[in-house]
Amino acid sequence: MATDSTAPPPAAGERRPGIGDRSGLLGGLMLAPAVIYIVALVGVPFMLAIALSTSSATVGAPGIHGFVGLQNFIDVMHQPAFPVALRNSVIVTLATLVVTIIFATAESELFARDFRGKWFWQIIIILPWAMPVSLAAVNWLWLLDSQFSPVDWILRQLHLLGPGTLLGPANHLYYYGREWLGLASITMINVWRLLPLATIIVLAGRTSIPRDIYEQAQVDGAGFFRVLFRITVPALGPILVVVSMFTALMVFGDMTITAITTHGGPGYSTQILPYWAFVKGIDGGALSQGAAVALFMFPILLAAAVLALRMAFRQENQ
C-alpha cells in the first residue's frame, strides 16, 4: 500500500514551523555572510596571487600568461633585499609582540584596580587604537623628524643628546636614517597603536579571574610579583596566546608604517616583506615577483596561527 509522504496540515490554532525552527537552515543562513566575505575578499585574491606568482605578468601586460612555475620565487630569493626584508619582518614582529604583551599585562593589572581618575586614563589609553594607522604614522613621522623632532629637543634639554653626552655629539638622532633606529622606531609605533587592543583583551581575561583566589593569596602573605607570576600570568595563558596571535598577524602583514616613515631605507636596510612586495609589484611593475614576495608570508603566518591556536587549546584543557 502506498503511503502519503506529505505532512498533515497543522491543526487549528497550531503555528506552522518557520525558518527559526530549522536549525540546519538557520545556521547556514547565519554563516553565509561570513563565508561570502572570506571567499570574495580572501579566497579570490589569494588564488589570483598564486596565478600571478607563476606567470610573467607585469604592469604593462597584467594578464595571467606565460607560465613560469617557481621561477619568480627563485628570482626574488636570490635578490639581496629578500633576506634583509625577511629578517626585519621577523625582528619587528617579535619585538612588537614581546613589548606589547609585557605592557598589556602591566596595564591590565593597573586597570583591574580602582583608583581616582580611572575613566580618564582609560580614554587616553584607547585613543591610539581609535586613530587611523596612516594618521598615526604621519604623527610619528613629525615626532621623529630629522630636523624638528620634539623628542630630540627634549633629549637635548636633558643633556642626553649633543656634544659630550650619552647619545652622541650630534643634535639629532636621525631615527629614520639609520638601520637599527629605523627598525626600533617602526617597532615603537606598532606597540603604540596595538597596545590598546591588547590591553582590553587581557583586561577582560584579568577581570574574569575569581577574586577569591587573590584574597586567599593575600591571606597567605603572597607578594605582588609572586601573585603575578604564580596566579595571574598562568590564568591569563590562553588570553595571552590569542593576543600574541592577533598582534603577530597584524604586524607581520602590515606595510603602512614602513611606507610612510622609512620607505624601507636607507637603501633596503629597514625593508619588510609586505612593503617590498608592494615596491616590486606596483612601483617596480613586476606583478609576478610582487605576488611571489607576498606569498612568502603565507606559510609563516599560517604556521604561527596554527601554533598559537594549538597552544591556547592545550592551556584551556590543562
Image: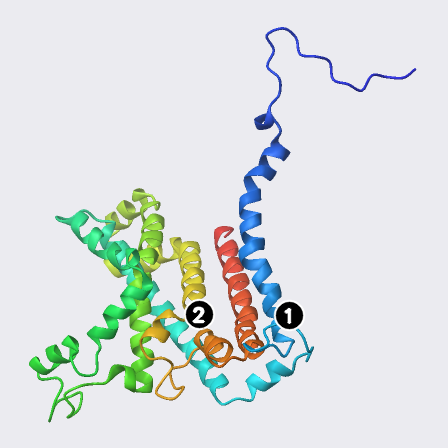
Q: Residue at x 18, y 87 (%)?
A: 167
Q: Earlier in the sequence, mark 2 or mark 1?
A: 1
Q: Secondary structure at mark 1?
A: helix
Q: Residue furthest right?
A: 1
- Location of residue 306 with respect to 70 vertically, above or below: above
Q: Quadrant of the N terminus?
A: top right
- Location of residue 89 with respect to 115 vertically, above or below: below
- x and y, in percent, of residue 184 in the image: 31, 78
In the picture of the structure, the residue carrying the numbered disc 1 is 51
- x and y, in percent, of residue 302 in the image: 55, 65
Label drawn at residue 259: none
Disc 2: CA contacts within 10 A as few (<14), some (14-19) or many (>=20): many
Q: What amino acid is at disc 1?
A: Ala
Q: Nearer the viewer, residue 28 or 232?
A: 28
Location of residue 13 by image quarter:
top right
Q: How is the image coloured?
A: rainbow
Q: What amino acid is at disc 2?
A: Phe
Query: Is there any visible trace of residue 124 in the rendered image?
Result: yes
Of badges 2 and 1, nearer the viewer stands 1
Q: Nearer the viewer, residue 36 or 112?
A: 36
Q: Residue at x 46, y 75 (%)?
A: 278
